[in-house]
């Protein structure tokens, strides 16, 4: 009889991990909005920031729901990449529907910056997690 190595079971993320991941995503989308408003000399106003922020926040929510990101919120490929793309695509679509400007250059900048933000922290978290797992001998 051959002996097989059991496949490690991946447990869904802890509630604290889910909350931290969601907060990180929301904060980074907000930072994107604030940087954009600042670079266009729009300055900070709560109303203006909310007008710019809400389409991307809805896109982020759609991405979380579509991928059921709460199961494994720190993974890069799934749910990270779809969350990033939903945030940009739905955000731009809602900007168009609400009469906000959408230029090709803005779409490109949003893809790049939100990609770096939303995937970047996941890559860092994954690297830290793998590094810690290697030290303790635990597989994740």
Image (tube, rainbow, N blue to C red):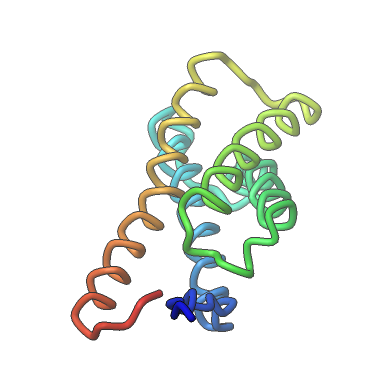
Q: Position of residue 25 (x, y in %)?
A: 51, 57
Residue at figure coordinates x 29%, y 68% from the top left: 130
Q: Quadrant of residue 135?
A: bottom left
Image quadrant in which the C terminus is located: bottom left
Picture layout, residue 62 above or below residue 98: below
Picture layout, residue 100 above or below residue 121: above
Residue lying farthest right?
97
Residue lying farthest top?
104
Q: Position of residue 103 (x, y in %)?
A: 57, 15
Q: Position of residue 119 (x, y in %)?
A: 43, 48
Left or right of 1 on screen, residue 63: right
Residue at figure coordinates x 35%, y 63% from the top left: 126
Residue lying farthest front?
1
Left or right of 24 on screen, residue 52: right
Choose between 117 and 77: the one closer to the eye.
Answer: 77
Choose between 137 and 32: the one closer to the eye.
Answer: 137
Picture layout, residue 132 above or below residue 84: below
Choose between 97 and 16: the one closer to the eye.
Answer: 16
Q: Position of residue 93 (x, y in %)?
A: 73, 29
Residue at figure coordinates x 58%, y 53% from the top left: 79
Picture layout, residue 48 above or below residue 11: above
Residue at figure coordinates x 48%, y 46% from the top left: 44
Q: How many marks?
A: 0
């Amino acid at each position: 009889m051959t002996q097989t190595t059991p496949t490690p079971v991946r447990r869904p993320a802890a509630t604290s991990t889910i909350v931290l991941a969601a907060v990180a995503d929301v904060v980074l989308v907000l930072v994107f909005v604030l940087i954009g408003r600042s670079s266009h000399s729009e300055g900070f106003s709560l109303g203006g920031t909310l007008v710019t922020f809400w389409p991307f926040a809805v896109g982020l929510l759609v991405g979380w729901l579509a991928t059921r990101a709460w199961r494994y919120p720190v993974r890069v490929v799934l749910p990270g990449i779809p969350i990033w793309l939903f945030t940009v695509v739905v955000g731009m679509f809602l900007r168009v529907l609400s009469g906000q400007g959408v230029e090709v250059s803005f779409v490109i900048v949003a893809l790049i910056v939100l990609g770096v933000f939303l995937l970047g922290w996941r890559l860092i978290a994954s690297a830290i997690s793998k590094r810690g797992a290697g030290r303790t001998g635990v597989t994740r």
